[in-house]
Image: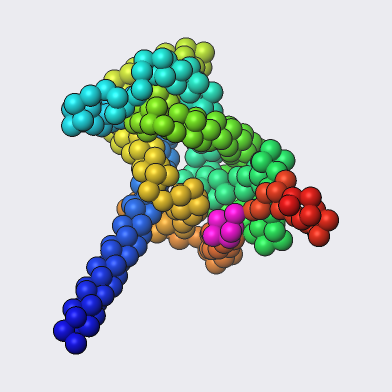
Amino acid sequence: MASMNMAMKKASNHNNSTGSHTSSSVSYRVGLICGFVILIVAQSLATERSLKSSHLAYSPWHAICLSEVMKLTVNVIYASFLLVRARGSNVLVADKHVLAQLLIRYILPALGYTAANALGLFAVDAAGATGALVAGQMRLPTTAAIWQVVMGKRMSMAHWTCIVGTVTCCISYELLRRLAPGSKANNHLWRLYVPTLLGSVASAIAGASNERLLKRFSSGKRAHSSIHNACLCANAALAALAMSHFAAPAPDVRWNALLEPPTALAVALHAAVGICVSVILKDLSLPHKAIAGTLAAPASVAFGYVVFGKPFPDAPRAAALLGVAICSCTFHALPMPTDDRSAPRNAEDEKKLR
């Protein structure tokens, strides 16, 4: 009887510890996503104000370069901490040849991310923070095309329904914003959607290359994730610095102008978003990152009202904004598409696979 009581007590303690661990894990995930949403909203609104009132509008490549240098500094500090704690360099990278390979192979992802960041600035300049965040959900057709054509994945009817709903709500929101009384949006739609779609393609290519490098060089502990991030940031900073010489900025643009508020705040928030992305991809997943980016669009409306006194959108635009959030979040919450090359379509295909 005593042994039975002891067993029941141990089982109860195990269940309590499991429940507390689960609740703490859920709290961490929710807190991380909420913090990421706040960072995205703050970065978008700060970028919008900086584009209108400071040198960021004339020198976006310098701002991107400074942001990548900030992220590089954080990764170098983190790598140095790991190196000191482990008392050996093998915890970071297997040998110097692997480091040289990473520096070369991360050129393509760095170019893609740098182009996507610059195009994102153009989208914010064309439609504001909320408009750019809503238009950013137009990347779903690009994602679907990459999954279908490049990766050979077969999407369900639910995926396609969410894509059509998201695209419809995105276009409806932008048209309603332009037709609203007192609207100052007099630029063409291509100034918003062309940078958004090109940025989504560049980001998708960079993400695929980055994921391949992480899987290839992380196996066997050939290189720590901080070394991957440092190589990516170093190449991105060099790419932005090189582009700044071809962009022909205004003659009065100086590097120290980027250290003046609100430009410095926008650059620092941009770096913080990049660091938080790596944390989310490490501890959560890519759908969590996408859902947080979707929730940032309606959150920017409330944040802009509280901080900057921006008016709330009217009922039709609010409905379109809510439709974007629902359709996009549903798309990313659905199960991942099946592989068209491995999923049997009938009994004959199943026999061949066996």
> Which image quadrant is residue 186 in?
top right
**Image point (71%, 61%), residue name:** 157
Q: From what the image shows, is residue 129 above or below residue 216?
A: below
Q: From what the image shows, is residue 111 above or below residue 324?
A: above
Q: Residue furthest left?
A: 2
Q: Is residue 187 visible?
A: no
**Image point (26%, 75%), residue name:** 11
Q: Is residue 69 magenta?
A: no
Q: How many circles with numbers are drawn on the protein?
A: 0
Q: Can residue 30 be seen in this view?
A: yes
Q: Front-most of 197 and 320? A: 197
Q: Is residue 335 magenta?
A: yes
Which corner quadrant holds the N terminus?
Answer: bottom left
Q: Which colour scheme is used?
A: rainbow
Q: Residue furthest bottom?
A: 1
Q: Front-most of 15 and 33? A: 15
Describe residue 244's horizontal placement relative to residue 338 as left or right.
left
Q: From what the image shows, is residue 272 above or below residue 307?
A: above
Q: Give the range drawn in magenta.
A: 331-336
Image x and y of residue 167, in percent: 65, 53
> Which image quadrant is residue 235 in?
top left
Describe residue 70's horizontal placement relative to residue 287 as left or right.
left
Image x and y of residue 208, in percent: 56, 35
Image x and y of residue 282, in percent: 39, 44
Q: Front-most of 249 and 282? A: 282
**Image point (36%, 18%), residue name:** 95
**Image point (39%, 27%), residue name:** 222
Describe residue 332's horizontal placement relative to residue 26 as left or right.
right
Image x and y of residue 283, in percent: 37, 48
